[in-house]
Image (tube, grey):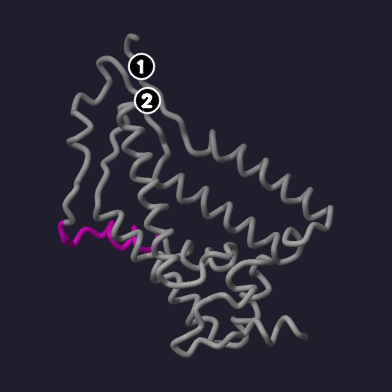
Amino acid sequence: MGNVNFEIGALTVLGPLMAAFTLFLAWRARQGRPGWTGQHTLTRLLAAAYAAGVLSLTVFPIVVTYGEYANQMPWTSQVSYIPVPSPDPSIVANVALMVPLGMLLPLMSAKATSLGRVTGFTALVSLSIELTQLLSYIVCNNARSVDVNDLIANTLGGLAGYLILRRAMRVPALGRRLNALALPGSALATGGIDARRGTPRVVEATVTK
């Protein structure tokens, strides 16, 4: 194959995708489709922007190297299987990275009805990112490591995001705003969030007005 060394930036891939999604969103809103107008448009746009941001931080840039430029270390050396406590500040960043996901899931999915479900889904998302990074290393010799500490920190971030959302629902003004943003059929819109432990179902007051 010869010597290859080039970089695929986030803007190159995610920029056109975000532009296409924004146009699609505007088209659906113009049609007046339920769940695609008003505050729901903002929810979907925020979710897309968040997803693009996560990908730009965790997957991009993709550095493709072959030949003399390639990383010669075996892919197994890039995987840290055992969690090791450390004062690495990146742990805080990895927790913060998934907090928005824990808040967005109940606004968008009918299945995000409990802390366990949101935490589990966040773990699956984080695992997908780690596997993508590993695949990128195997295929493109992209120098990214796969760390179980990142998986744990990301999962804790999703858990924290859900708890923050549930706490916010206790504040009437925030509860009304969140219900306005919740997509039709989502856990929050249908009152499906686990409202035990003192969390009121603000949705009942907002739907009947």
Which stretch appears magenta?
A: 84-97
The local crowd at label 1, few if under 14, some if 14 to 19, many if 20 or more residues have their Cα within 10 Å, is some
Looking at the picture, how far across and down is residue 186, in whole percent? Answer: 61, 67
| Snapshot quadrant of residue 68 | top left
The local crowd at label 2, few if under 14, some if 14 to 19, many if 20 or more residues have their Cα within 10 Å, is some
* Amino acid tagged 2: Val
* Amino acid tagged 1: Val
> Count the marks: how many?
2
Dividing the image into 4 quarters, which one contains the N terminus?
A: top left
Q: Are marks 1 and 2 in contact (CB under 8 Å)?
A: yes
The residue under label 1 is 4
Could you tell me which residue is drawn at 55 percent across and 40 percent down? 14
Report the disc number at residue 86.
none
Q: Earlier in the sequence, mark 1 or mark 2?
A: 1
| Snapshot quadrant of residue 139 | top left
Could you tell me which residue is drawn at 44 percent across and 88 percent down? 197
Q: In the image, is residue 87 above or below residue 20?
A: below
Q: In the image, is residue 158 above or below residue 126?
A: below
| Snapshot quadrant of residue 150 | bottom left
Dividing the image into 4 quarters, which one contains the C terminus?
A: bottom right
Could you tell me which residue is drawn at 37 percent across and 57 percent down? 123
Could you tell me which residue is drawn at 84 percent across and 53 percent down? 31
Looking at the picture, how far across and down is residue 122, in whole percent? Answer: 41, 59
Q: In the image, is residue 32 above or below residue 1?
A: below
The residue under label 2 is 64
Q: In the image, is residue 56 above or below residue 103?
A: above
Which element type, helix, strand or loop, lies under badge 2? strand
